[in-house]
Image (cartoon, grey):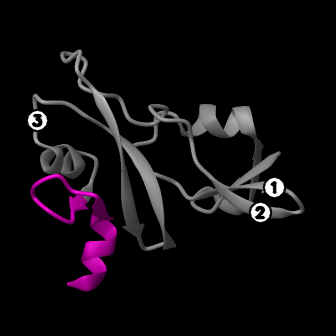
């Protein structure tokens, strides 16, 4: 299907493969939608496409976190966590503020937190 990305521009559309390739090295998570069943639906990149886990750790666990941003609706994003670093610190490195210092299931983009200041 056709994928559109709000951060790249409302008129910018990609095929599925190109959307993944273009966004795979993006630190920030763009909100994308894919045209399926006669309407646009949320498009989630496959786990691990955008976030590189710790290259020195072989015990990486991917965990889904509900993320809020200035773009509106919350999105679930899979983050790579490992025992080498606490989850809250890892989220902060990806520019997401954890909803809890221990075992966070919710996070907010730094831009979202700036709006609340």
- Pinpoint residue 22: horizontal percent, then vertical percent: 60, 36
Q: Is residue 28 left or right of residue 30?
A: left
Residue of label 3: 85
Q: Residue at x 19, y 18 (%)?
A: 57
Q: Residue at x 38, y 61 (%)?
A: 66
Q: Is residue 53 left or right of residue 82?
A: right
**Label located before the other in sequence (2 or 1):** 1
**Label located before the other in sequence (2 or 3):** 2
In reply to whether residue 116 is colored magenta, the answer given is yes
Quarter of the picture containing the C terminus is: bottom left
Residue of label 1: 35
Q: Is residue 26 above or below residue 9?
A: above
Which of the 4 quarters of the picture holds residue 32? bottom right
Mark 1–mark 3 Cα distance, whole angstroms, equals 38 Å
- Pinpoint residue 18: horizontal percent, then vertical percent: 70, 34
Q: Which residues are magenta?
A: 97-117
Residue of label 2: 40
């Amino acid at each position: 299907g056709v994928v559109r990305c709000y951060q790249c521009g409302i008129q910018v559309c990609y095929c599925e493969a190109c959307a993944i390739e273009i966004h795979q090295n993006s630190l920030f998570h763009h909100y994308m939608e894919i045209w399926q069943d006669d309407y646009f639906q949320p498009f989630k990149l496959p786990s691990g496409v955008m976030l590189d886990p710790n290259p020195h750790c072989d015990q990486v666990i991917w965990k889904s976190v509900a993320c809020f941003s200035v773009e509106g609706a919350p999105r679930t994003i899979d983050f790579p966590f490992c025992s080498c670093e606490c989850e809250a610190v890892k989220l902060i490195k990806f520019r997401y503020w954890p909803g809890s210092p221990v075992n966070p299931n919710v996070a907010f983009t730094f831009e979202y937190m700036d709006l609340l200041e």
